[in-house]
Amino acid sequence: MTDTPMARGHGLRRDIDLLEALASDEAQRAGGLGVVRLAQLVGREKTQISRALKALAAEGIVERDPDTLEYRLGWRLFSLVARTSESRLVRVAEPVMHALSADLEETSHLCVLHDREVLTLLSVSGHSFRVHGWEGRGVPAWRLSAGRVLLADATPDELYVRFGTAGEMPVPELWSLIQEAGRRGYARVSEEFEADLVGVSAPVRDFRGRVVAALNISAPKARLGDRLDEAGRTTARAAARVSALLGFEPRPVPLPRKTPL
């Protein structure tokens, strides 16, 4: 077949059909799909599907389970999506952070969860005081207010898997702090990470409602300690604005039913 732009576009469309099938609810529930089922879903010959999957697997776009021989979306595709999402997150959050830092006259940070640590993607200063060197630095999640909101979606079992051997903070205590932050709408710490340093954090959610980042304000206790809750509420409103820009729409809380007299 002649390698024309039209032919290449047609081949790309076929590959996208395969990727959409591997991203379907059926594939997610099953943990992958075999060549026969994929051929049925996209309406192509099994030999064509097999060749296409081998080419995609060679590039890391899909991967094949060595036991079941079924295919699923691969590491390289997730890596590309993660980098794109992270870039958009920073781009969307930065102007909101400038406004937040100007409002509170304190440094704001955009944080994400990386394994058991909180990683700072961006810091914006609103004051002469500046916490230097936070970008790219990882800090144990259980020690920070940001960690407690970034772990909002975790179950107790997931916390045990992630932190059960850490020893610095018992998982039941961490779970209690995470639940407290969820009820309040923001987390707060006072000198738990570093002497004379206090902070608040609020969750940033994506269009699925999942916590993908945290907005944090950190400052010396002498300057922020007396207005920590005010800063928490302000930070929560800023985080809600970033969430809205990422497509998050909070569901209305249903009103309690009145009991008939």
Image (cartoon, grey):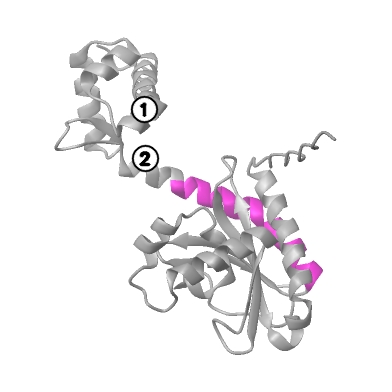
Which residue was labeled with disc 2?
Answer: 77
Q: Amino acid at mark 2?
A: Leu
Give SS at disc 1: helix
Q: Is residue 222 magenta?
A: no
Labels 1 & 2 near each other (Cβ < 8 A):
yes
Q: Quadrant of the C terminus?
A: top right
The residue at 51%/47% (across/down) is 85
Q: Which residues are magenta?
A: 82-104
Which residue was labeled with disc 1?
Answer: 19
Residue 251 picture location, percent across and down: 69, 39
Q: Is residue 118 above or below residue 65?
A: below
Crowd around label 2: few <14 · some 14–19 · many ≥20 (10 Å):
some
The residue at 36%/74% (across/down) is 166
- The quarter of the picture where residue 177 lies is bottom right
How many marks can you see?
Answer: 2
- The quarter of the picture where residue 104 lies is bottom right
Considering depth in this image, is 89 or 194 the residue closer to the camera? 194
Q: CA distance from mark 1 to mark 2?
A: 10 Å
The residue at 82%/33% (across/down) is 260
The residue at 65%/50% (across/down) is 92
Q: Earlier in the sequence, mark 1 or mark 2?
A: 1
Instruction: Using the rendered image of the protein, determine whether residue 98 is visible from the camera's viewpoint.
Output: yes
Q: Is residue 258 above or below residue 194?
A: above
